[in-house]
Image: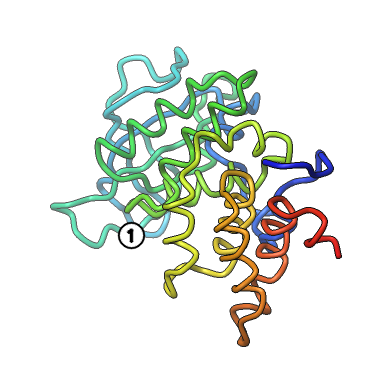
Amino acid sequence: AGARPETDAPACSLCGGLLGQAPTLRQEAAQPSARMILYGTLDNPRGSVSTELNVEVVLRADPAINGKKQLDLGRYLPISDPKNSLHFLVFCDVNNDKIDPYRGVPIGGAEGLDYVKKALALDPKDPADNLGFYFRYLENPDKEVARDAFLELARANDRQIGQASSQLSAEKLRAWIKDPQTPTERVSLYSFLLGGCGGDADAGFLAAQLNEDGERTVNCFDGYLGGYIHLRPRDGWD
């Protein structure tokens, strides 16, 4: 994306405290504790201590789940609409044949499940293609899918983003940056990504954002400047 110093620093020192949040789904699945990964709907909440998961798909199996269609999650989770229960992705450890569900993530229907399956199957040795995959889900209607894809890109380093830049869409990034509803931490990252895949007109666009007055410019300034430096290194550093 033009002459610029390469670093292994995360792209998103621009993203506030987001990097300290829970692991992405891919990162969680790579933990030794993720002995099982299940997908299904919540059912039968009892008192304040129990809710069951109706197991629809076993994404990672262990003999402890064999033949079981329901799993007691060991905690109460409210079900606002019993006729339209949320789907959950549940990570479980297994200790002495006892299943320990330790993290649940609300994931939508077939499209959300498809995202999870594809994310868990990605080759960790091909970060450029992986980032191209996550880019396609950045503004997905499923908030947890969009959040997970965003964190994957936010945790990538400059070199990886440079390698993936040909798979990103400058047109989409510009539209998201312009949208006043886009949260500021996303605007910062999107501006940084635009520096990796945009052209001369995008340098002008980012320069114009830097010169705008207002709270949004203050909050997104590092992202605007990071993208601008990628596209016009001399002017940006000056």
In the rendered view, would you say 1 is above or below 224? above
- Say which of 78 and 120 sits in front: 120
Q: How far across and down, in percent of the image, does residue 216 sit?
A: 59, 79
Q: Quadrant of the N terminus?
A: top right
- Name which residue lies at 63% across and 51% down: 195
| Image quadrant where residue 236 sits | bottom right
Q: Nearer the viewer, residue 42 or 233?
A: 233
Q: Quadrant of the C terminus?
A: bottom right
Tell me the residue that label 1 is attached to. Answer: 78
- Residue 17: x %, y % from top left: 69, 62
Q: Quadrant of residue 203?
A: bottom right
Neighbourhood count class around disc 1 (C-alpha, 10 Å): few under 14, some 14–19, many 20 upward: some
Residue 127, position as x, y percentages in the image:
62, 27
Q: Is residue 125 above or below residue 156?
A: above
* Residue 7 appears left or right of 16: right
Spot occupied by residue 86 in the image (x, y as percentages of width and height): 28, 49
The mark total stands at 1
In the image, what residue occupies the spot 64% across and 28% down? Answer: 31
Q: Residue at x 26, y 46 (%)?
A: 43
Horizontally, is 223 left or right of 141 in the view? right
Q: 63 or 212: which is nearer to us?
A: 212
* Coloring scheme used: rainbow
The amino acid marked with disc number 1 is Pro
Disc 1 secondary structure class = loop
Q: Residue furthest left?
A: 83
For the view shown, which residue lies furthest in the bottom direction?
A: 214
Question: Viewed as shown, does residue 30 lie left or right of 84?
Answer: right
Residue for point 67% across, 44% down:
155
82 relative to 16 in the view: left or right: left
